[in-house]
Image: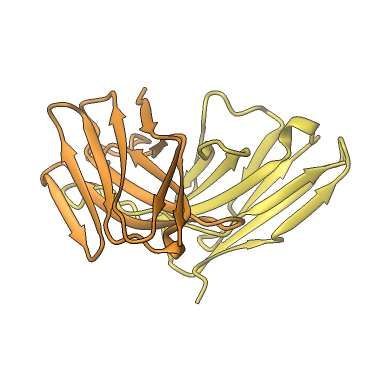
Amino acid sequence: DAMVIQNPRYQVTQFGKPVTLSCSQTLNHNVMYWYQQKSSQAPKLLFHYYDKDFNNEADTPDNFQSRRPNTSFCFLDIRSPGLGDAAMYLCATSKLKIGRAGNQPQHFGDGTRLSIL
Amino acid sequence: GENVEQHPSTLSVQEGDSAVIKCTYSDSASNYFPWYKQELGKGSQLIIDIRSNVGEKKDQRIAVTLNKTAKHFSLHITETQPEDSAVYFCAASLAPYSGGSNYKLTFGKGTLLTVNP
């Protein structure tokens, strides 16, 4: 059963037209991440939520925003998509345990491939 | 910040042969090293991970070795099968002993493994 679900799998939008990608999880993980992955490149972290705390990467453009209304859902909003924003967008979750338990594995969804016309 | 280098970028082997992918990292404080497999059009799947308190971990045909002194870790796949063909990503992160955002994964650029029947 899918544990990190991204919708839609494929999204086409017009240049400059706002678009929202969604992610839901059934793992009850307290951390949710959004990555951008362009062709033949490594996933690049855009931002993540630790519970309700939003953590933006320093080089993430202002054009990218995120919302996490509850534990299960997280959204990626692109306010004015440009041609350079065409990519695969990956959502991931993990359970963060402070202390000796250390870092826990990140679980990825299948991604949303965004195309810009 | 952390920097992860991954080699080779492409690897082609015959079915039944072994495949080795190597990664180096720059931050000696990193202590968690996962490997992800990404099949075409899908998100990344964790296949094995290792923490800095062990030097080797094995799971059936997959093994990972870690050399903390040299700051490198490697993925070993034995008896390769065509279904092993995918892009493999290594990553490194810090354990969140003190909270904050120092548990982010830094990915290598990926290795495209092709197993020829």
The chain drawn in yellow is: A
Q: Quadrant of residue B31?
A: top left
On screen, residue A61 versus residue B15, left or right, reads right
Above or below residue A63? Residue A28 is below
The front one of A87 and B86 is: B86
The front one of B95 and A1 is: A1
Q: Position of residue B95 (x, y in %)?
A: 25, 41
The front one of B86 and A97 is: B86
Above or below residue B11? Residue A11 is below
Q: Position of residue B83 (x, y in %)?
A: 45, 64
**Where's the C terminus of chain A, which quadrant?**
top right
On screen, residue B70 versus residue B88, left or right, reads left
Question: Which residue occupies 68% across, 28% down?
Answer: A62
Residue B81 visible within the image: yes
Q: Quadrant of residue B1?
A: top left
Q: Position of residue B101 (x, y in %)?
A: 38, 36
The chain drawn in orange is: B
Residue at the far bottom: name it. Answer: A1
Question: Which residue occupies 35% across, 49% down?
Answer: B35
Residue A31 visible within the image: no
Question: Which residue occupies 66% across, 39% down?
Answer: A65
Question: Which residue occupies 27% across, 37% down?
Answer: B94
